[in-house]
Structures are given as C-alpha cells and as structure tokens.
Image (cartoon, grey):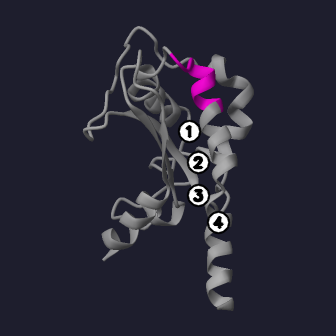
Amino acid sequence: MKILTIAPLALLCSLAVALSAQGYAYDFFYFVQQWPGSYCDTSSGCCYPSYGKPPSDFDIHGLWPNYNNGSYPSNCDPNNPFDLSKIQDLVSSLQPNWASLACPSSDSTSFWQHEWEKHGTCCETVLDEHSYFQDALNLKSMTKVLSCLKSASNKKLRN
C-alpha cells in the first residue's frame, strides 16, 4: 500500500524539462522532488542531516538527464569528479532544499557528490557543476509543489 501512495507522489513531483536533442547526449531532464515523510516511511528509515531536520516541504532528489525511450545516461565523465569548492556559495541553500535523508546522517555532501557524478556529468556540456545545482534550486523555487497541493486541496474543500 505504501508503494501505491508513494508512486503518484513521485510522478507528481517529477517535472520533465524539455530540451532540444540536437547536440546533447540526452533528450530531457527529470527534476525529481521527494516528500521526506515518504522517504522516511520506508523499511530502511531515514536519518536527518547532521545540520538538522529539513523543512516540511518537498525536497530535491535530483536533476536527471533522460532519453525519450525511458533509459538514462549515468556516470558519464569520471574525469570530472564532484568538487565542493565549486558550489560552496550554494551550500546554505542546498542544505534545506537538497538534503540527504540516508543513514547514517551526514552533511549531504556525499549525496550531492553522487548526484553530480551519476547525473550531472552527463549534462556537463550544458551545465557545469555550479549551474547544475543552481538550476535545480531555481526549479524548486519555481515549482512550489507543496503550495500547489495546498491550494488544490483548499479549492476542493470549498466546492
């Protein structure tokens, strides 16, 4: 039953950002957000980041290049590893918006490293490391999933 609850939220919280396929090694991006409570309600549970509990809001899970056939590129450039110094100015925004809930708790750096090396390096011709994380933060501020759901719920209650 939990899967049936989580699946629609995962679908709802994924935003496909279309790009022209010309010159890129992918067709579009998935901008994936997750509800921390759903993540924590799995059999593996969760641990809050070492810097504190994230806000009660949808959290960024990743910005993933994808192909139209449903597959995706991954780990595209081992010669371009994650470098925290390149996004140091974003850390204070990343922590509340792109937190790792995996155990053991951490400062989320290893999660950001994983996302950059697995997904970000596959779009580095368009987004360097800083732009990759900045654009994900920008998308989150534009989508406001929780506000949309609250608004829809209020409208339904009034009808």
| SS of the residue under disc 2 | loop
Question: Residue 30 placed where, x, y %?
Answer: 45, 42
Left or right: where does residue 89 sit relative to residue 117?
right
Residue assigned mark 4: 148
Magenta-colored stretch includes residue 142: no
Question: Residue 10 placed where, x, y %?
Answer: 42, 58
Amino acid under disc 1: Ser
Front in this rendered view, residue 12 or 61: 12
Q: Quadrant of the N terminus?
A: bottom left
Front in this rendered view, residue 156 or 5: 156
User: Residue at point 35% right, 59% down?
Assistant: 44
Q: CA distance from mark 2 to mark 4?
A: 26 Å
Question: Residue 128 placed where, x, y %?
Answer: 56, 17
User: Residue at point 52% right, 61% down?
Assistant: 35
Mark 3 or mark 2, earlier in chain = 2
Q: Quadrant of the C terminus?
A: bottom right
Residue assigned mark 2: 49
Graded by Cα atoms within 10 Å as few (under 14), some (14 to 19) or many (20 or more), the crowding at tag 1 reads many
| SS of the residue under disc 1 | loop
Residue assigned mark 3: 58
Mark 3 or mark 1, earlier in chain = 3
- Dominant secondary structure of the residues highlighted in magenta in the image: helix
Mark 2 or mark 4, earlier in chain = 2
